[in-house]
Amino acid sequence: MNYRLYLILLFPSFLFSQKIDHLVSFRDINSTSYFRFNYENDYFAATDENYTQGYNFELVLPIFERNPLNFLLVEPKNSKIKYGLAIEHIGFTPNHYERSEIQVGDRPFAAAIMLKSFVMSTDTIRNSRFSSALSVGLIGPGAFGEEMQVGIHKATGNKKPLGWRHQIKNDVVLNYQLGYEKELVSYNERVSVRASTNLQLGTLFTNLSAGFNMTLGWLDTPFSNARKGFRLYLYSQPMVKLVGYDATLQGGLLNTDSPYTIPNADIERFTAQLDYGLILQTRTLYFEFSRSLITREISTLGSAAWGGMKVGFTF
């Protein structure tokens, strides 16, 4: 057992897990109109494998209440509701991305791009938050994961990735997500602990997870009607997840012609993850730096790590 797993076991509870988790309540921005850029890369953890990069352009506006896809999303009554759209891209590579042959026992090259429609509902009476999202897109060469990584490595002088011709082939992404959070402890606007659960169902990811998150610092809880401007706080987000299907490892559900995928028997059905970071907010600006550690997702691999940054502003 390595040090990353020891860190995770320090928090023996469960929380939902996903890449680019911008819907969780401790990342709430006190506005119904804002833009935020979410970026993650394993470079921040001094590696270049597994989850290699992800980004998300997130836009929240009242006009998105007219989005016709909202009838598929959940809008609880007696809640403050925010409506948004996002463009999201994620990419994965094996350890020896510079080799042209298939890396048997390692994860496949894979990339996906999606348009996400989402709704966030906050109940200030029950101190709870409900989120739902629908993502539509593509996994495979059409998501231009190869072009992006090759361009970045060329610009930075790193080794050229040569194995993308073996990537997961083109297939449709149609994913639905439901999340729920309940505040358990809140003390003097300095400490907050929230339980959560999350479900993803679709052609890209199918999984179920649950747990908690904790924040410490100068807080401004989204469950309060008296919101402040300045906020500076640390957060910790330990989690486990039950994995049903992962197209970035197992290939698309419709197109089964990918040259290399991970057998069902080698998929780790339970994973543990720890996210932690620092968030600074003013009335108009949002800044965050984060790190993530995860146990192995394939029986033949070890644990992995990445980091991220988020920048946003209200208008």
Image (cartoon, grey):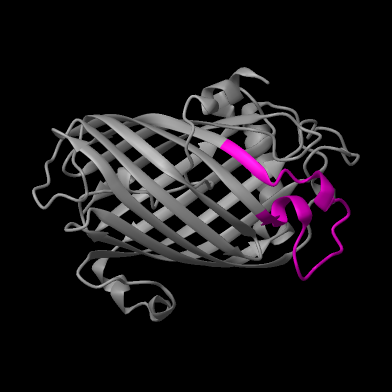
Please report the residue visible at 31 percent of the width from the left and 51 percent of the height from the top. Answer: 182
Q: Position of residue 289 (x, y in %)?
A: 40, 31
The N terminus, quarter of image? top right
Of 246 and 181, which appears nearest the observer? 181
Left or right of residue 168: residue 90? left
The image quarter containing residue 282 is: top left
Residue 255 on the magenta segment: yes
Asked if residue 241 lies left or right of residue 72, the reply is: right
Position of residue 109 measured from the top left corner of the image (x, y, whole percent): 76, 46
Image quadrant in which the C terminus is located:
bottom left
Q: In the image, what residue occupies the spot 35% across and 40% down?
A: 311
The image shows residue 279, relative to residue 200, as above or below, that is above
Q: Is residue 43 above or below residue 64?
A: above
Q: In the rendered image, is residue 53 in sight?
A: yes
In the displayed structure, 103 sits above or below 205; it is above
**In x, y percent, where is residue 26?**
31, 43
View extreme (top): residue:
3
Location of residue 100 by image quarter: top right
Indicate whether residue 241 is drawn in magenta.
no
For this rendering, which residue is in front, 287 or 125? 125
- Point out residue 42 in the picture as x, y percentages from the top left corner: 59, 31
The answer to whether one can see residue 290 in this image is no
Give the left or right position of residue 50, taking residue 67 as reference.
right
- Segment colored magenta: 244-272
Q: Nearer the viewer, residue 199 or 252?
A: 199
Q: Residue at x 59, y 58 (%)?
A: 113
Which residue corresponds to the image point at 43% horizontal and 30% vertical from the top-left? Answer: 276
